[in-house]
Amino acid sequence: MAFVVPAPGASIEPAALITWCKANMANYKVPGSVRVVNALPVSASGKVVKGELRKMARIDQGCPGQKGGSFSTSTSVVCA
């Protein structure tokens, strides 16, 4: 899953972004899904809070109760 923050005034179509990734990136780097967000969660020191992103991804995939384990960027959920 990829989390994308659009530039001010811009819009992002997740399916079009995935199509672009497939055409321009190595297959293993292409996200299985894209979630457009207004901002990434950051800590007080300004670092991205990856745990919050993982939590958001699990909720999107219907696994809110899952804890721990590794996080895979490939998923069977594809935004269209």
Image: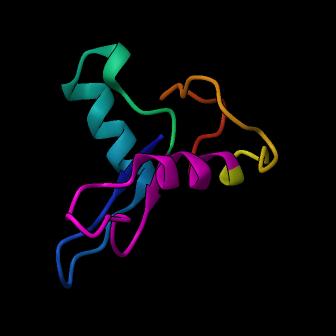
Residue 43 falls inside the magenta stretch: yes
Query: Residue at image x 60%, y 30%?
Result: 75
Q: What segment is highlighted magenta in the picture?
A: 34-58
Say above or below: 63 vs 60. Answer: above
Q: Is residue 20 left or right of residue 19?
A: left
Query: Residue at image x 30%, y 55%?
Result: 48
**Residue toward you, 13 or 68:** 68
Say above or below: 65 vs 74. Answer: below
Q: Is residue 57 left or right of residue 34?
A: right
Q: Position of residue 77 (x, y in %)?
A: 65, 39
**Residue toward you, 32 or 67:** 67
Q: Position of residue 9 (x, y in %)?
A: 20, 85
Tell me where residue 4 sits by quadrant.
Answer: bottom left
**Residue toward you, 22 or 75:** 75
Tell me where residue 56 sits by quadrant.
Answer: bottom right
Q: Position of residue 62 (x, y in %)?
A: 79, 48
Say above or below: 73 vs 28. Answer: below
How many numbered circles does the render carry? Answer: 0
Residue 42 falls inside the magenta stretch: yes
